[in-house]
Protein backbone atom coordinates (compact mmCIF):
# COMPACT_ATOMS: atom_id res chain seq x y z
CA UNK A 1 0.00 0.00 0.00
CA UNK A 2 2.79 2.45 0.94
CA UNK A 3 6.11 1.90 -0.71
CA UNK A 4 9.07 4.03 0.31
CA UNK A 5 12.26 3.84 -1.73
CA UNK A 6 15.65 5.39 -0.95
CA UNK A 7 14.04 8.30 0.89
CA UNK A 8 16.37 11.01 2.20
CA UNK A 9 16.00 14.42 3.76
CA UNK A 10 18.97 16.69 4.17
CA UNK A 11 18.64 19.93 6.13
CA UNK A 12 21.16 22.60 5.31
CA UNK A 13 21.88 24.78 8.33
CA UNK A 14 24.35 27.68 8.46
CA UNK A 15 27.32 25.60 9.44
CA UNK A 16 26.40 22.03 8.64
CA UNK A 17 24.39 19.56 6.65
CA UNK A 18 22.02 17.31 8.68
CA UNK A 19 20.97 14.00 7.11
CA UNK A 20 17.72 13.61 9.12
CA UNK A 21 16.49 10.68 6.99
CA UNK A 22 19.14 8.69 5.19
CA UNK A 23 18.31 6.43 2.26
CA UNK A 24 15.31 4.78 3.90
CA UNK A 25 13.25 2.04 2.22
CA UNK A 26 10.09 0.45 3.67
CA UNK A 27 6.95 -1.38 2.59
CA UNK A 28 3.77 -0.84 4.61
CA UNK A 29 0.85 -3.16 3.92
CA UNK A 30 -2.82 -2.22 3.78
CA UNK A 31 -4.65 -2.52 7.10
CA UNK A 32 -1.43 -2.78 9.10
CA UNK A 33 -0.49 -0.81 12.23
CA UNK A 34 3.12 0.02 11.49
CA UNK A 35 5.25 1.57 14.22
CA UNK A 36 8.55 3.40 13.83
CA UNK A 37 10.49 3.70 17.08
CA UNK A 38 13.64 5.63 17.82
CA UNK A 39 15.28 7.97 20.29
CA UNK A 40 15.09 11.73 20.01
CA UNK A 41 16.88 12.98 16.91
CA UNK A 42 16.63 9.63 15.06
CA UNK A 43 14.63 11.29 12.26
CA UNK A 44 11.14 9.94 13.01
CA UNK A 45 9.24 13.24 12.74
CA UNK A 46 10.99 14.16 9.53
CA UNK A 47 10.16 10.72 8.14
CA UNK A 48 6.44 10.78 8.99
CA UNK A 49 6.04 14.39 7.81
CA UNK A 50 7.38 13.36 4.41
CA UNK A 51 4.64 10.75 4.05
CA UNK A 52 2.06 13.47 3.45
CA UNK A 53 4.61 15.95 2.10
CA UNK A 54 4.39 18.33 5.07
CA UNK A 55 8.12 18.02 4.50
CA UNK A 56 9.50 17.66 0.98
CA UNK A 57 12.03 14.84 0.51
CA UNK A 58 15.51 15.71 -0.77
CA UNK A 59 15.48 12.48 -2.78
CA UNK A 60 13.70 9.15 -3.06
CA UNK A 61 10.17 8.05 -3.78
CA UNK A 62 6.93 7.51 -1.84
CA UNK A 63 4.08 5.69 -3.56
CA UNK A 64 0.69 5.19 -1.98
CA UNK A 65 -1.74 2.89 -3.79
CA UNK A 66 0.41 3.19 -6.93
CA UNK A 67 0.29 6.98 -6.87
CA UNK A 68 3.69 8.63 -6.75
CA UNK A 69 3.38 11.27 -4.01
CA UNK A 70 6.86 12.60 -4.58
CA UNK A 71 6.45 13.76 -8.16
CA UNK A 72 2.85 14.99 -7.81
CA UNK A 73 1.78 18.56 -8.68
CA UNK A 74 0.50 20.73 -5.80
CA UNK A 75 -3.06 20.45 -7.12
CA UNK A 76 -3.02 16.65 -7.31
CA UNK A 77 -1.32 16.48 -3.93
CA UNK A 78 -4.19 18.43 -2.32
CA UNK A 79 -6.60 15.71 -3.49
CA UNK A 80 -4.26 12.83 -2.56
CA UNK A 81 -3.85 14.29 0.95
CA UNK A 82 -7.53 13.71 1.63
CA UNK A 83 -6.63 10.02 1.81
CA UNK A 84 -4.08 10.70 4.54
CA UNK A 85 -5.21 11.84 8.00
CA UNK A 86 -2.75 12.92 10.66
CA UNK A 87 -2.77 13.37 14.44
CA UNK A 88 -0.17 15.18 16.50
CA UNK A 89 1.42 15.09 19.94
CA UNK A 90 -0.06 18.48 20.88
CA UNK A 91 -3.36 17.87 19.11
CA UNK A 92 -3.19 21.03 16.87
CA UNK A 93 -6.85 21.90 17.48
CA UNK A 94 -8.43 25.27 16.69
CA UNK A 95 -8.99 26.73 20.14
CA UNK A 96 -11.73 29.19 19.15
CA UNK A 97 -13.85 26.42 17.58
CA UNK A 98 -16.04 23.89 19.37
CA UNK A 99 -15.45 20.14 19.16
CA UNK A 100 -18.11 19.95 16.44
CA UNK A 101 -16.57 22.77 14.41
CA UNK A 102 -13.04 21.37 14.76
CA UNK A 103 -14.17 18.06 13.32
CA UNK A 104 -16.22 19.85 10.63
CA UNK A 105 -13.23 21.91 9.48
CA UNK A 106 -11.79 19.47 6.89
CA UNK A 107 -15.32 18.81 5.59
CA UNK A 108 -15.84 22.53 5.04
CA UNK A 109 -12.60 22.69 3.06
CA UNK A 110 -13.78 19.71 0.99
CA UNK A 111 -16.99 21.67 0.24
CA UNK A 112 -19.49 19.17 1.65
CA UNK A 113 -23.17 20.20 2.10
CA UNK A 114 -24.34 21.37 5.54
CA UNK A 115 -26.64 18.41 6.04
CA UNK A 116 -24.02 15.85 5.10
CA UNK A 117 -21.49 17.64 7.28
CA UNK A 118 -23.74 17.53 10.37
CA UNK A 119 -24.43 13.85 9.88
CA UNK A 120 -20.79 12.96 9.36
CA UNK A 121 -19.56 14.99 12.34
CA UNK A 122 -22.13 13.41 14.63
CA UNK A 123 -21.08 9.94 13.45
CA UNK A 124 -17.43 10.77 14.15
CA UNK A 125 -18.21 12.20 17.59
CA UNK A 126 -19.85 8.91 18.47
CA UNK A 127 -17.07 6.81 16.94
CA UNK A 128 -14.40 8.46 19.11
CA UNK A 129 -16.54 8.34 22.28
CA UNK A 130 -17.30 12.05 22.67
CA UNK A 131 -21.09 11.96 22.53
CA UNK A 132 -22.57 15.01 24.26
CA UNK A 133 -19.34 17.05 24.01
CA UNK A 134 -19.93 18.59 20.56
CA UNK A 135 -20.45 22.10 21.94
CA UNK A 136 -17.42 22.07 24.26
CA UNK A 137 -14.28 24.05 23.47
CA UNK A 138 -10.87 22.34 23.47
CA UNK A 139 -9.88 24.21 26.66
CA UNK A 140 -12.74 22.44 28.47
CA UNK A 141 -11.45 18.97 27.54
CA UNK A 142 -8.88 16.61 29.06
CA UNK A 143 -5.79 15.66 27.04
CA UNK A 144 -7.32 12.34 26.06
CA UNK A 145 -10.53 14.00 24.91
CA UNK A 146 -8.53 16.55 22.87
CA UNK A 147 -6.76 13.70 21.11
CA UNK A 148 -10.14 12.08 20.40
CA UNK A 149 -11.15 15.30 18.65
CA UNK A 150 -7.86 15.15 16.73
CA UNK A 151 -8.63 11.58 15.66
CA UNK A 152 -12.21 12.42 14.61
CA UNK A 153 -10.95 15.39 12.58
CA UNK A 154 -8.28 13.22 10.93
CA UNK A 155 -10.94 10.67 9.94
CA UNK A 156 -13.46 13.21 8.60
CA UNK A 157 -12.67 12.65 4.92
CA UNK A 158 -12.53 8.85 5.19
CA UNK A 159 -8.77 8.58 4.74
CA UNK A 160 -7.05 5.31 3.85
CA UNK A 161 -4.05 6.07 6.05
CA UNK A 162 -3.72 7.63 9.48
CA UNK A 163 -0.34 9.09 10.44
CA UNK A 164 0.28 9.44 14.19
CA UNK A 165 3.12 11.73 15.26
CA UNK A 166 3.86 10.82 18.92
CA UNK A 167 0.09 10.93 19.46
CA UNK A 168 0.18 9.71 23.06
CA UNK A 169 3.43 11.25 24.27
CA UNK A 170 1.68 14.12 26.08
CA UNK A 171 -0.77 11.80 27.86
CA UNK A 172 -0.63 9.90 31.16
CA UNK A 173 -0.34 6.07 30.99
CA UNK A 174 -4.05 5.36 31.49
CA UNK A 175 -5.17 7.90 28.91
CA UNK A 176 -2.45 6.62 26.56
CA UNK A 177 -3.97 3.15 26.80
CA UNK A 178 -7.50 4.39 26.07
CA UNK A 179 -6.28 6.27 22.97
CA UNK A 180 -4.31 3.21 21.83
CA UNK A 181 -7.45 1.07 22.28
CA UNK A 182 -9.35 3.58 20.14
CA UNK A 183 -6.69 3.37 17.40
CA UNK A 184 -6.96 -0.45 17.36
CA UNK A 185 -10.74 -0.16 17.23
CA UNK A 186 -10.57 2.19 14.24
CA UNK A 187 -7.97 0.00 12.52
CA UNK A 188 -10.25 -3.03 12.86
CA UNK A 189 -13.58 -1.32 12.16
CA UNK A 190 -12.48 0.77 9.21
CA UNK A 191 -9.58 -1.31 7.91
CA UNK A 192 -7.47 1.83 8.16
CA UNK A 193 -3.70 1.58 7.70
CA UNK A 194 -1.95 3.31 10.62
CA UNK A 195 1.64 4.55 10.59
CA UNK A 196 2.89 5.83 13.93
CA UNK A 197 6.11 7.16 15.33
CA UNK A 198 6.99 6.89 19.00
CA UNK A 199 9.86 6.66 21.45
CA UNK A 200 7.84 4.33 23.73
CA UNK A 201 8.11 0.56 23.27
CA UNK A 202 4.85 0.20 25.22
CA UNK A 203 3.00 1.77 22.27
CA UNK A 204 4.62 -0.67 19.84
CA UNK A 205 3.93 -3.65 22.10
CA UNK A 206 0.31 -2.75 22.65
CA UNK A 207 -0.93 -2.00 19.16
CA UNK A 208 1.56 -2.51 16.34
CA UNK A 209 1.79 -5.44 13.95
CA UNK A 210 5.09 -4.38 12.41
CA UNK A 211 7.91 -2.31 13.83
CA UNK A 212 10.92 -0.52 12.38
CA UNK A 213 13.70 0.78 14.62
CA UNK A 214 15.27 4.01 13.49
CA UNK A 215 18.70 5.38 14.38
CA UNK A 216 20.59 8.25 12.77
CA UNK A 217 18.12 8.53 9.90
CA UNK A 218 18.22 4.83 9.00
CA UNK A 219 16.08 1.79 9.72
CA UNK A 220 18.45 -0.50 11.63
CA UNK A 221 16.01 -3.33 12.34
CA UNK A 222 12.54 -4.23 11.19
CA UNK A 223 9.95 -6.99 11.37
CA UNK A 224 6.93 -8.55 12.95
CA UNK A 225 6.57 -7.09 16.47
CA UNK A 226 6.74 -10.50 18.12
CA UNK A 227 9.91 -11.52 16.23
CA UNK A 228 11.62 -8.28 17.13
CA UNK A 229 10.64 -8.72 20.79
CA UNK A 230 11.86 -12.29 20.75
CA UNK A 231 15.12 -11.81 18.90
CA UNK A 232 16.21 -8.17 19.01
CA UNK A 233 19.45 -7.93 17.05
CA UNK A 234 20.68 -4.39 17.45
CA UNK A 235 21.77 -2.82 20.74
CA UNK A 236 19.26 -0.01 20.33
CA UNK A 237 16.43 -2.52 19.82
CA UNK A 238 17.46 -4.49 22.92
CA UNK A 239 17.27 -1.28 24.95
CA UNK A 240 13.75 -0.63 23.67
CA UNK A 241 12.63 -4.20 24.39
CA UNK A 242 14.06 -3.93 27.93
CA UNK A 243 11.87 -0.82 28.40
CA UNK A 244 8.80 -3.02 28.57
CA UNK A 245 10.12 -6.46 29.48
CA UNK A 246 12.99 -5.80 31.83
CA UNK A 247 15.64 -8.48 31.72
CA UNK A 248 14.49 -11.36 33.97
CA UNK A 249 17.97 -12.84 34.13
CA UNK A 250 19.48 -9.61 35.31
CA UNK A 251 16.66 -8.65 37.63
CA UNK A 252 16.75 -11.87 39.54
CA UNK A 253 19.96 -13.74 39.24
CA UNK A 254 19.61 -17.33 38.17
CA UNK A 255 22.39 -18.26 40.57
CA UNK A 256 20.18 -17.15 43.44
CA UNK A 257 17.26 -19.19 42.11
CA UNK A 258 19.45 -22.29 41.70
CA UNK A 259 20.80 -21.82 45.23
CA UNK A 260 17.43 -21.34 46.87
CA UNK A 261 15.52 -24.04 45.03
CA UNK A 262 17.62 -27.16 45.03
CA UNK A 263 14.87 -29.78 44.88
CA UNK A 264 13.54 -31.11 41.57
CA UNK A 265 14.28 -29.21 38.35
CA UNK A 266 14.44 -25.54 37.48
CA UNK A 267 13.02 -24.77 34.03
CA UNK A 268 13.05 -21.67 31.90
CA UNK A 269 9.90 -21.47 29.78
CA UNK A 270 9.79 -19.15 26.83
CA UNK A 271 6.35 -18.18 25.56
CA UNK A 272 6.23 -17.04 21.96
CA UNK A 273 2.92 -15.75 20.83
CA UNK A 274 0.73 -18.83 20.64
CA UNK A 275 -2.28 -18.17 22.85
CA UNK A 276 -3.21 -21.89 22.81
CA UNK A 277 -0.17 -22.64 24.92
CA UNK A 278 -0.63 -20.02 27.59
CA UNK A 279 -2.34 -22.64 29.79
CA UNK A 280 0.66 -25.00 29.69
CA UNK A 281 1.34 -24.68 33.45
CA UNK A 282 -2.19 -25.67 34.44
CA UNK A 283 -2.14 -28.46 31.81
CA UNK A 284 1.02 -29.89 33.37
CA UNK A 285 -0.37 -29.75 36.90
CA UNK A 286 -3.53 -31.54 35.76
CA UNK A 287 -1.80 -34.23 33.70
CA UNK A 288 1.29 -35.02 35.80
CA UNK A 289 2.11 -35.71 39.43
CA UNK A 290 4.46 -32.76 39.83
CA UNK A 291 4.35 -29.75 42.13
CA UNK A 292 5.04 -26.51 40.34
CA UNK A 293 6.51 -23.41 41.92
CA UNK A 294 6.46 -20.26 39.82
CA UNK A 295 9.68 -18.45 40.70
CA UNK A 296 10.02 -15.46 38.46
CA UNK A 297 9.04 -14.14 35.08
CA UNK A 298 7.25 -11.71 32.89
CA UNK A 299 4.72 -12.39 30.17
CA UNK A 300 3.42 -9.57 28.08
CA UNK A 301 0.75 -9.30 25.40
CA UNK A 302 1.38 -7.99 21.89
CA UNK A 303 -1.03 -7.67 18.96
CA UNK A 304 0.37 -10.99 17.73
CA UNK A 305 0.00 -12.92 21.02
CA UNK A 306 1.83 -13.39 24.32
CA UNK A 307 5.56 -13.22 24.69
CA UNK A 308 7.85 -13.70 27.69
CA UNK A 309 9.97 -15.84 29.96
CA UNK A 310 9.05 -17.66 33.15
CA UNK A 311 11.20 -19.59 35.62
CA UNK A 312 9.50 -22.51 37.37
CA UNK A 313 10.51 -25.32 39.69
CA UNK A 314 9.16 -28.85 39.15
CA UNK A 315 9.24 -31.11 42.21
CA UNK A 316 8.30 -34.80 42.09
CA UNK A 317 9.49 -38.22 40.85
CA UNK A 318 12.26 -37.95 38.26
CA UNK A 319 10.37 -39.94 35.59
CA UNK A 320 7.22 -37.91 36.07
CA UNK A 321 9.17 -34.65 35.76
CA UNK A 322 10.80 -35.95 32.56
CA UNK A 323 7.38 -36.80 31.12
CA UNK A 324 6.07 -33.34 32.03
CA UNK A 325 9.06 -31.73 30.30
CA UNK A 326 8.48 -33.88 27.23
CA UNK A 327 4.88 -32.68 27.19
CA UNK A 328 5.94 -29.02 27.29
CA UNK A 329 8.43 -29.69 24.50
CA UNK A 330 5.56 -30.90 22.34
CA UNK A 331 3.93 -27.42 22.57
CA UNK A 332 5.26 -24.17 21.11
CA UNK A 333 6.61 -23.16 24.53
CA UNK A 334 10.40 -23.40 24.47
CA UNK A 335 11.85 -25.09 27.52
CA UNK A 336 15.34 -25.09 28.96
CA UNK A 337 16.19 -27.42 31.86
CA UNK A 338 18.49 -26.18 34.64
CA UNK A 339 19.26 -22.98 32.74
CA UNK A 340 22.57 -21.26 33.38
CA UNK A 341 23.15 -17.52 33.25
N1 LIG B 1 14.05 22.08 10.00
C1 LIG B 1 15.20 21.55 10.38
N2 LIG B 1 16.38 22.14 10.12
C2 LIG B 1 17.55 21.59 10.48
N3 LIG B 1 17.67 20.41 11.09
C3 LIG B 1 16.55 19.75 11.38
C4 LIG B 1 15.24 20.28 11.04
N4 LIG B 1 14.31 19.39 11.44
C5 LIG B 1 14.98 18.35 12.01
N5 LIG B 1 16.30 18.56 11.98
C6 LIG B 1 17.36 17.65 12.47
O1 LIG B 1 17.13 16.37 11.91
C7 LIG B 1 17.41 15.34 12.85
C8 LIG B 1 16.18 14.46 13.01
O2 LIG B 1 15.14 15.23 13.64
P1 LIG B 1 13.66 14.66 13.89
O3 LIG B 1 12.87 15.73 14.59
O4 LIG B 1 13.13 14.12 12.62
O5 LIG B 1 13.96 13.47 14.90
P2 LIG B 1 12.96 12.69 15.87
O6 LIG B 1 13.42 11.28 15.87
O7 LIG B 1 11.57 12.98 15.48
O8 LIG B 1 13.28 13.33 17.26
P3 LIG B 1 12.27 14.12 18.24
O9 LIG B 1 11.34 13.10 18.78
O10 LIG B 1 13.19 14.71 19.27
O11 LIG B 1 11.61 15.17 17.38
C9 LIG B 1 17.84 16.05 14.13
O12 LIG B 1 19.27 16.09 14.16
C10 LIG B 1 17.29 17.44 13.98
O13 LIG B 1 18.08 18.38 14.67
Image (spheres, rainbow, N blue to C red):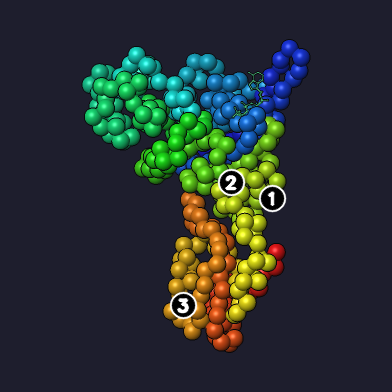
* Quarter residue 139 falls in: top left
Toward the right, the furthest residue is 15
Element marked by disc 2: helix
Q: Earlier in the sequence, mark 2 or mark 3?
A: 2
Image-based side of 270 in relation to 99, left or right: right
Residue occupied by mark 3: 285
Q: Position of residue 59 (x, y in %)?
A: 68, 24
Q: Is residue 25 visible?
A: no
Sequence-wise first label, 3 or 1: 1
Q: Is residue 65 left or right of residue 251?
A: left
Q: Does residue 142 appear in the picture of this structure?
A: yes
Q: Which of 51 and 86 is in front in this view?
A: 86
Q: Residues within 10 Å of mark 1 (few under 14, many from 20)?
A: few
Furthest-front residue in this view: 260
Disc 1, ligand 1: is the CB inside 8 Å? no
Q: Residue 243 carries which label?
A: 2
Q: Is residue 222 left or right of residue 149?
A: right
Q: Which quadrant, please, contains the C terminus?
A: bottom right
Report crowding for label 3: few under 14, some 14 to 19, many 20 or more residues within 10 A (C-alpha). Answer: some
Q: How crowded is mark 2: few (under 14 residues within 10 Å), some or many (20 or more)?
A: few
Amino acid sequence: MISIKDLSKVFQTKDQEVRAVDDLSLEIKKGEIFGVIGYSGAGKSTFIRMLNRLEDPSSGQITMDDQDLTSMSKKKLRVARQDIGMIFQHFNLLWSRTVFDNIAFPLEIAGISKEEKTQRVNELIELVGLSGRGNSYPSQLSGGQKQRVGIARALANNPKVLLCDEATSALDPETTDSILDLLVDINEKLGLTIVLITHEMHVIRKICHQVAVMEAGKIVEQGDVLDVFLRPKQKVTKRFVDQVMGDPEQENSLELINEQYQKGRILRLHFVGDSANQAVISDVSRKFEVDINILHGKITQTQKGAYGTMFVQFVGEKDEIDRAIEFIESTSVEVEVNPSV
